[in-house]
Each structure stands twice: as structure tokens, then as C-alpha cells.
Image (cartoon, rainbow, N blue to C red):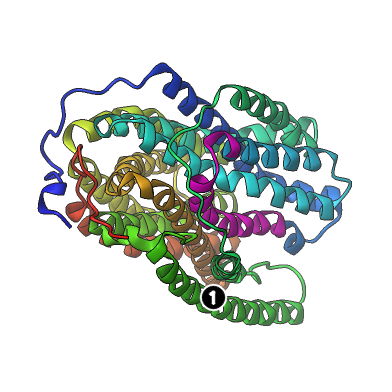
Amino acid sequence: MHANALSTGSVPTSTGAAAVPRSDTRVIWLLLGAAFVAILNETTMGVAIPHLITDLGITAVLAQWLTTAFMLTMAVVIPITGFLLQRLTTRQVFVTAMSLFSAGTLIAVLAPGFEVLLVARVVQASGTAIMMPLLMTTIMTLVAPQSRGRMMGRVSIVMALAPAIGPTMSGFLLDTLGWRWIFGVVLPIAIVALVVGARWIRNVGSQTHARVDVLSIVLSAFGFGGIVFGLSQIGGGGSHGGSTADAAAASGMSTATFVISLVVGVAALAAFIWRQLRLQRRNDALLDLRVFRSANFSLSVGHFAVISLAFFGTITVLPLFAQNAMGLSPLVTGLVVLPGSLAMGLAGPLIGRIYDRWGTRVLLLPGSILVVALLWLFTTLTENTPVWELVVTQTLLSIGLALSFTPLFTASLGSLEPRFYSHGSAIVSTVQQVAGAAGIAVMITIMNAGFEANAAAGEQAAWAAGARQAFLFAAIVAIPTIVGAILIRKPADAVGEVPMGH
């Protein structure tokens, strides 16, 4: 790593912002719009699961596959996007992604039952998986280094506002029109985005003619897919209905599936890494791992993994705590998390400007300290906690996370040479999926175990105790991010950090 490649992270690095040409801005906004639709679609499903159990006449275990299959498909497809973004043109990748997403949404609208709806979710996820790496790579290619923070701030608006709107929209549609309209509202927006994007998106960067390594694709699918699927089985016996024998059998099957899936996933991932190290010598890797020669990229990705684990686990446990322990309705629960999501999105552009001007440390350090402090405060919540306290706590946590995400996205990819942007974007997105799945699985398991251990105290008190134990796990896991916040730097504006040889 070159000593002069990085700024101090705490002093001004640039005062001016290079203007982004109008044609480039249009491409970015089209991609932002498409990403918004994809994320909005995903955040509607959590609220819909109970309705689907009743309307489709399926079990809770089957219904959960509508989420598990989506996550699994994302984990399988995302690692391949690094190769796709180099092999295909920007327009081809966009049209492919939005066509898959639109087709999946249409199938969902028309689905006669669970099986077809599950297929629809897989097709949707195939398109969704491509959108975020495409967006990130395009921004890194088109936007000058000194302006990337501001543009990444806009990305944070999309990532925050879609989850804020999704559950509320889903609840309204479920209460008035039925579950098909969750997809019915998204479909025309997706089709418009597809048509407009196919017309206006121009090609960005240059394409390579690397051959497709089928073995790498297979190993990637079994590696990342096996790990995510295994993690999704943790706590699979968390239902508290049915007989003791049924619960024990379900728990045993879940444990066996978890172990087998994880062993297969780790073994396949090790083989995948070995394969990429060999292929990258001739620039044929499906996912080029030379990006990890950048210490700043590696630190940023590690920091991102830890904060994603704590973040996704917490935002999954928090609504369960609000409904099961505090007795709040789904609508009120959605309103509780709404201010935090809005604050996170609206703060994005300002945080981006601060990053462009001052670098990483002035954002990451207070952000990490705030997140850790708030997670520890979460461990004090009880079934009698006032709703206003929960709103304030969750909003402050969201602001702390906002202070972290934009600098991490920008600093990690900015540490790479332009030819590695697509691989870096794919790795960051893959890490988010795997770490998020791990956080959700572990924290739900801890919460269920806490519920069982405290069942004698009453149902609401037991759920509160379980949630506090889960939040304690997140608080402990998040502590190393304070150290990472000190070490991660803003890359120098003019050069990539990594002297990567062929």
C-alpha cells in the first residue's frame, strides 16, 4: 500500500466538487429509481407473511421460504455480478436486471398458489441482486472522487426511504386490497423504469472478453448459498405452537440442516477462493480477490460486515419486541421505526458533503460510538418502556448508522483501481447479504432462547428478556467498529490505493 495514497481522514481533502455531466446524472438517477423499486418490494414482504399463511393455507415454515428463497438467490447471484458488469454493457445489465425483476413481479401478481409465488420471488431476487452492484460501480466510474460522498448520500436516501415506506404501504394494501396488490403497485413502476432505462441509459466503462468459468459459478452458488441457507435454519424451531414432540423434531431437523449446509458452504467457498486465486493470474476470475490487497478496502469491508450483522439483526428483533413485548400493533410498530428511516435518508446528502470535505474519521468515529451506545441502551428496554423512548432510541440509532454507511461505501470502493470497481461492489454487496443473514439468524435464536428461559415471568416479560439478550449480543459485536473507525481513511482523490499486478 502506498503511503501517499490515503489522506489523514480528518483534514480537508478537496474544496471543490467536479460537476457531473447531465447525461451521467440521468444514468445515475435512473439506476437509483430502479434500486428504490427493488428495495421497496423487498421491505413489503415481512408484513405480508401472516396474511399469506392464511390466504394461501400454508404453514409458517413454508411461508418463511418466501423470504429465505429471496435471500438465498441474492447470495448466489451477487458474486457473479462482478463478472457480468465487466463482460456486458451497462444497458445490457440494466435491462437484464429490470426484466427479471418485472417478470418476477408479474408472476407474483398472477400466482395461483404458494409454489408459483415462490418461483416469482426467486426471479425477482435475480434481478434485485444485480441492481446495487450496478449502481455502485456506475457511481464510482462516473463521479469524480471529490464528489462521491454526495452521490453516495443520495444512495443512502434510497436505502433508507424504501424500507420506511414499504411496511406502511404493505399494511395499507393488505388491509384494503389483498396481498396481490403489494406486487400490483410495484409492477407498473418497474415496467416504466425498464422502458425509460432501456431508452436513456448509456454504456459506462469498457467491456472485457473474459471467458465464463462454469466451475467458479457452481462453487460460488454452493459456497455463498450454502452459508446463507445454513444461517437461515438457525432458530428454525422458534415457533412456540404445536406439541413438544413436533418442536423437538423440527429443532433436530433444523440443527442437522444447519450443520450440513454450513459444512458444504464453507468447503465450497474455500474451493471457490482457491479457484479465483488461480484464475486472476490471467484476469479470468469470476470475483477478483486482488481487491483485498488494499488494506483500506479490507478494513472497510470488515467494518461493514460487523455493522451489517448488528444492524440487520437489530431491525429484525426490534419490531418483534415492539409487538410481542410492548403489545403494539403492526401499524404503530411501523410508525415507531418511520422517523429513524426518514432521518437516516434525509441525513444522507449532508453526510456525503461532510465526507467529501473532511474524510472518514469525523463521521465514522462518532457514528460508531453512537451505534454502540444506543445498542447498549437497547439492553435496558422492558415491556413497560414508553413508546416515545423507543422512537427516540431507534431514531438516534439510525442516525449513527447513517454516519457509517456512506463513508464505508465510498472509502471501500474508492480504495480500488477503476478496473476493480465491479468486483469490489459485488464483494461489498455479498458481505452485506451474508453478514445480515448471520445477524438475523443469531439474534432471533438468542431472543427465542431468552423467551423460553423466562417463560415463567409471563409472555410479554419473557419476550422483553429475550430481546434484551439479543440486543446485548449486537452491542458486544459492534464494539470493534470503534477501532475500525480510527483506522479507515479516505482514499486520496487522484489515485487508487492498490498497485495490483497481473
Disc 1 target residue: 268
Q: Which residue is drawn at 23% across and 41% down?
A: 363
Identified by mark 1, the residue type is Ala
State the residue in front, 499 or 59.
499
State the residue in front, 445 or 483.
483
Q: Which residue is drawn at 13% across and 44% down?
A: 7
Q: Which residue is drawn at 33% across and 57% down?
A: 291
Decide whether residue 85 is among the magenta residues.
yes
Percent from the top left, x then y, of residue 333? 56, 41
Image quarter hosting the C terminus? bottom left
Percent from the top left, x then y, of residue 334? 56, 38
Relative to residue 259, is residue 362 depicted above or below? Answer: above
Q: Which residue is drawn at 55% across and 70% down?
A: 223
Percent from the top left, x then y, of residue 288? 41, 59
Q: What stretch is highlighted in magenta?
A: 64-92
Decide whether residue 411 is among the magenta residues.
no
Picture quadrant where residue 380 is located = bottom left
Q: Is residue 100 found left or right of 452 in the rendered image? A: right
